[in-house]
Amino acid sequence: MAPVEIRGLSKRFGNVLAVNDLSFDIDAGRVTGFLGPNGAGKSTSLRALLGLVRPTSGTATFGGRRYEELQRPSTKVGAVLEDASFHPGRTGRNHLRVLAVTGRHPPERVDVVLDTVGLTAAADRRVKGYSMGMRQRLAIASALLGDPEVLILDEPTNGLDPPGIAWMRGMLREQASRGRAVLVSSHLLAEVAQSVDDVVVISGGQMRGHGTLEQVLGGDEGPATQVRSQDDQRLARALQAAGHDVTALAAGGGLIVPGVSPQDVGVIAHDAGIYLVALGQQSRSLEQAFFALTGGESIA
Amino acid sequence: MSALLQAELLKLRTTRTFVALVAAALALSLLVVVLVSILADEFNDNDVRNLFTADFTGLFIVLLGVIGMAGEWRHRTITSTVLAAPDRIRLLAAKMLSYAAAGALLSLIVTLTIMLVGTVILSLRDKETADLADLVDVLWRNLLVAALVGALGVGIGAVVRNQVAAIIGVLFAAFVLEPTLLGLAPDYGRFGPTQGAPSGIIQVAGFDGEDTENLLAPGVAVLVMLGWIGAFFAAAAARLRGGDLV
Ligand SMILES: Nc1ncnc2c1ncn2[C@@H]1O[C@H](COP(=O)(O)OP(=O)(O)OP(=O)(O)O)[C@@H](O)[C@H]1O
Ligand SMILES: [Mg+2]
């Protein structure tokens, strides 16, 4: 059983079908990017996972239980939602102390997570005086308090500076390497591409792509090979004779062979006695992939 | 449940509003008791008993309950609160119970303080003082009222959700609506949740000399208060149970 299982999840707000029949799993030990343009339904999906929004239909379960059914949920699932809010008059430390009491975590955990997010020095200041990045760090500290098996983060880099973003990526990778399942949403593929293993792409509330980063970037047929040779026309004939589709690029730009690895293209060229000038794997660019999957609704 | 209660009490303690309102409750109660016990001349033992019902904890704990619960929406902390305790109905119950406990504890402190100060002043002036049985009688009534209105405040806050509207509503009911009703139509006024029924529990009429005949009997008044609390709990639970928290 996957740590998180989403089955047929839908949510309607009046006329808006914000989430439409989503089904996917999130695996332990991996960071899953949950991608989609603005208004795609990412936040609504994540809130439905957490039982904050009541799904119109479908379920989301953690180890087979809905969030509301979890015993001590903070030990199972940690969440950082969009625009994390705190009581402005309470200190960061007190906010965490309340959560530690609710979740029956030892008080020392408060100091540990404050240190993890680099907020120890500001811990005894009122949240009112925190910067956006500090609030975001406090939200992350809250999510880590119970050392949960699953981490769910909605656009967690909002408000973080570049070192903060780098720290965040490292933290997510480290959690995955400890066997945690991490789900992190973003409307920018490029932003998460460096730190995710799997991606789920949604747009208009519907799933548009799902798989490893390589699979999704490669499109349906997987990665393509780009090749240039001494004689592209002969090479094209040889490849076609071997049963592959070939697209010629404009004026000496070489050939694109979708769904075939560079090694296989090299072997065919060698057998046909054709010298290669250039040979390499062509991935769709992040933007191309994202555009194609989301129907070009928004620029990544 | 006990973890939730503890967490709510910790939340309550760690804001300045709490410190300010507790100080205000103590100061106001002391002010009234000190002034009356210094200035009053014709004093019988029933007056002394009534004097010690001047525990203003109830007013402040009902406001704290409203502020604490509606504040979850105002500060948009309701999502993180519900994430930590996903059973919304249990959460509501825990919040009501913790404010009831806080109300009783504060009332204990305030009532014991005013009893001590009032008794010292009156005995220095060689006036009548209340006997122990009377003091104990007033004490538990004050405690009970504070506990009940603490839970009531949480219920009101959870139903109304808008903090300012809820505070204004409670103040209006306590200082305009219910006193007016008690004066003009006591048959209805005595059932009110902020003045009518609490006065029935304490068995004291206002300082303007009305008698207690119009009030509900204490036992009935407690039941009426529980009815109000139950009604607000049910309405709040219905709103919470099905709703999206966004
Ligand atoms: N409480 C609500 N009431 C009505 N419509 C809503 C509500 N919340 C979300 N929506 C609608 O649902 C759709 C999805 O919104 P959602 O916030 O989930 O998108 P998102 O992918 O998180 O976008 P962003 O990248 O901007 O955060 C939008 O059309 C939005 O207007
Ligand atoms: Mg969003």
Image: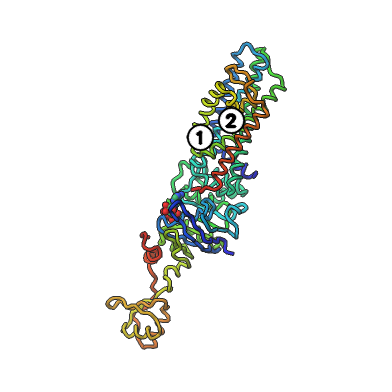
Which of pointers 1 and 2 lies earlier in the amino acid sequence? Answer: 1
Asked whether residue A191 is in view, the answer is: no
Which residue is at 69% across, 25% downward? B137
Q: Which residue is mark 1?
A: B166
List x then y, in percent, for residue A234.
32, 85
Q: Nearer the viewer, residue A65 or A177?
A: A65
Q: Nearer the viewer, residue A54 or A14?
A: A14
In the shown orientation, is residue B88 left or right of residue A291? right
Asked whether residue A221 is in view, the answer is: yes
Label drawn at residue A90: none
Measured along the vertical axis of the image, is residue B211 above or below residue A204?
above
Q: Residue furthest left?
A: A251
Q: Quadrant of the N terminus of chain B?
A: top right
Q: Are marks 1 and 2 on the same chain?
A: yes
List x then y, in percent, for residue A23.
51, 63
Q: Which residue is mark 2?
A: B193
Q: Secondary structure at mark 2?
A: loop
- Report the label total: 2
Q: CA distance from mark 1 to mark 2?
A: 14 Å
Residue type, mark 1 in image: Ala
Residue type, mark 2 in image: Pro
List x then y, in percent, for residue B189.
57, 26
Question: Label 1 CB, ligand 1: below 8 Å?
Answer: no
Please state the chain letter of the residue tagged with numbered disc 2 in the rendered image: B
Q: Secondary structure at mark 1?
A: helix
Please state the chain letter of the residue tagged with numbered disc 1 in the rendered image: B
Question: Label 2 CB, ligand 1: below 8 Å?
Answer: no
List x then y, in percent, for residue A114.
53, 49
Quarter of image, res B226? top right
In the shown orientation, is residue B115 left or right of residue A78? right
